[in-house]
Image (cartoon, grey):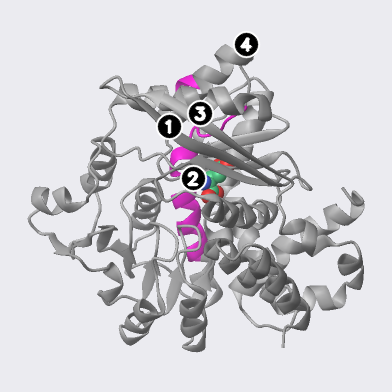
């Protein structure tokens, strides 16, 4: 069936057998773009696919730091500079004990197409460290960030590579990373995004990913002549993306009844709204590793231990926690419970088997690289703000973000229709993202 793609996928499998997450996204993207490859033999001749699956540069470094007990700790830091055809490498940093090259390469590869879909001048990259930020003191976080930047600073720059946050890296960490970059280089410039507002940050950046997810979902429903008013939504996670998504969904008239963490979920049939939205921020800032305290604070809610929110009946599901949180088994529950829409807030939250099952059962999927692109889109707006030595107003940022999300939805829907695939946003997003990068790579020769 997919003669051209399968061949490339096989080669990546043989070369990187121990990077399953990277293989998963490579398979998903290349399978979708098979018809594009068929229509463009010149891409194959120019080695576009071989070049896309290999990062332009991979940097790995030691991060030594001293903990509060005076002990020396050592972590491994990375930056995968994946593709710069469309602009400087752009993508977040993830601090998590699960970080290894296979995770960062999956995220970096996805980022290329996500950034392409925004229509903005940004290439793709990703980085991070196998550092566990949970239960660390503020001083430990600061010293770790400083040591991380000491190793990374000479590789990045506002026109070269511009990191941001991801899991485990928020405004506080970006602030500490920025401080050390400025000290080492003596340059106050837009080398990182998601910065604190006092430090060249962009108003609206913290809620951007979640707002974008909600706007993208609204476009999916609109395509079917529906809207969000009165709809019940099941959401996972309780971090930044979850918070932004819930805030905007409430404004759009939907009702969100769950949040979750790795060990269970909270069911709140009265809706996560009003002051509960802000409580999510407090919960996160307090360093809790669980959302259980939500159910202790609000008696109308209950914590369901050891289970995932996908067992709760709803028409709309939005995974906002992490990769592969929806398996084939979960997908079966969701379909049995009346799922009609899945909109991905986290990166690659759904396994390829689960995506296939949901699509076979008529579920409309908003894929992450389209639906969660609002975060990185606002990062690019932040880069523009910093290089223009100015500050933008929140309402102007929101307006641009909403336009960008509407446009991404349109691009994905049109690409899918153009290749005779109907309304398949998963394939359409891959195709539209790929086409723009491939054209730029062709224009720039073999580099
Ligand atoms: O996955 C993502 O798009 C991010 N973590 C944000 C990347 C960015 O550069 O803002």
Pick whichever of labels 3 and 2 is earlier in the sequence. Answer: 3
Between tags 3 and 4, which lies in front? 3
The one nearer the camera, 286 or 230, is 286
| Above or below for 113 versus 340 | above
Q: Main SS type for the magenta part?
A: helix
Residue underneath mark 3: 148
| Above or below for 430 versus 386 | below
Q: CA distance from mark 3 to mark 4?
A: 17 Å
Pick whichever of labels 3 and 4 is earlier in the sequence. Answer: 3
Q: Quadrant of ligand 1?
A: top right
Q: Which residues fall within the magenta stretch?
A: 191-218
User: Is 199 inside the magenta-drawn segment?
Assistant: yes
Disc 4 residue lies near ligand 1 with CB under 8 A: no
Residue 212 lies, in percent from the top left, at 50, 53
Residue underneath mark 1: 74
Dot 4 crowding, Cα within 10 Å, few <14, some 14–19, many 20+: few
**Residue at the image position 31 percent from the left and 75 percent from the top:** 314
**Residue at the image position 57 percent from the left and 20 percent from the top:** 181
Residue underneath mark 2: 208
Between tags 4 and 1, which lies in front? 1
Disc 1 residue lies near ligand 1 with CB under 8 A: no
Label 2 near label 4: C-beta < 8 Å?
no
* Residue 358 appears in the figure: yes
| Label annotation for residue 186 | 4
Label 1 near label 2: C-beta < 8 Å?
no
Name the secondary structure under disc 2. helix
Pick whichever of labels 4 and 1 is earlier in the sequence. Answer: 1
Drawn side of residue 400 relative to residue 84, left or right:
left
Name the secondary structure under disc 4. loop
Residue 216 lies, in percent from the top left, at 52, 61
Dot 1 crowding, Cα within 10 Å, few <14, some 14–19, many 20+: some
**Residue at the image position 63 percent from the left and 21 percent from the top:** 189
């Amino acid at each position: 069936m997919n003669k051209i793609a399968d061949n490339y996928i096989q080669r990546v499998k043989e070369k990187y057998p121990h990077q399953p997450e990277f293989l998963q996204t490579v398979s998903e993207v290349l399978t979708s773009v098979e018809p594009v490859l068929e229509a463009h033999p010149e891409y194959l001749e120019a080695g576009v696919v071989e070049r896309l699956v290999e990062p332009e540069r991979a940097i790995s470094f030691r991060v030594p730091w001293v903990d509060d007990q005076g002990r020396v700790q050592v972590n491994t830091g990375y930056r995968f500079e994946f593709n710069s055809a469309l602009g400087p490498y752009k993508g977040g940093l993830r601090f998590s004990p699960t970080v290894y090259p296979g995770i960062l390469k999956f995220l970096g590869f996805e980022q290329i197409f996500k950034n392409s879909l925004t229509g903005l001048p940004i290439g793709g990259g990703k980085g991070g460290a196998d550092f566990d930020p949970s239960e660390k003191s503020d001083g430990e976080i600061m010293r770790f960030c400083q040591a991380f930047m000491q190793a990374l600073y000479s590789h990045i720059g506002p026109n070269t590579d511009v990191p941001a946050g991801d899991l485990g890296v928020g405004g506080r960490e970006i602030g500490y990373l920025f401080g050390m970059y400025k000290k080492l280089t003596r340059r106050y410039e837009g080398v990182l995004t998601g910065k604190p507002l006092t430090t060249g940050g962009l108003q609206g950046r913290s809620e951007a990913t979640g707002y974008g997810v909600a706007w993208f979902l609204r476009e999916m429903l609109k395509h079917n002549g529906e809207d969000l008013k009165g709809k019940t939504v099941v959401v996972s996670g309780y971090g930044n993306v979850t918070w932004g998504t819930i805030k905007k969904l409430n404004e759009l008239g939907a009702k969100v009844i769950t949040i979750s963490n790795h060990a269970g979920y909270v069911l709140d049939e009265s809706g996560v709204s009003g002051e509960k939205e802000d409580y999510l921020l407090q919960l996160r800032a307090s360093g809790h590793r669980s959302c259980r305290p939500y159910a202790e604070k609000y008696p109308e809610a209950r914590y369901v231990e050891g289970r995932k929110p996908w067992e709760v009946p709803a028409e709309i599901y939005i995974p906002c926690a992490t990769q592969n949180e929806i398996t084939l088994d979960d997908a079966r529950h969701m379909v049995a419970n009346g799922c009609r829409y899945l909109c991905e807030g986290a990166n690659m939250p759904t396994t390829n088997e689960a995506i296939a099952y949901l699509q076979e059962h008529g579920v409309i999927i908003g894929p992450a690289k389209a639906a969660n692109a609002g975060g990185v889109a606002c990062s690019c707006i932040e880069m523009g703000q910093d290089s223009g030595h100015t500050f933008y107003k929140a309402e102007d940022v929101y307006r641009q973000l909403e336009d960008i999300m509407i446009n991404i939805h349109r691009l994905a829907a049109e690409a899918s229709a153009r290749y005779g695939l109907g309304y398949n946003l998963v394939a359409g997003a891959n195709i539209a993202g790929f086409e723009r990068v491939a054209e730029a790579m062709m224009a720039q020769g073999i580099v």
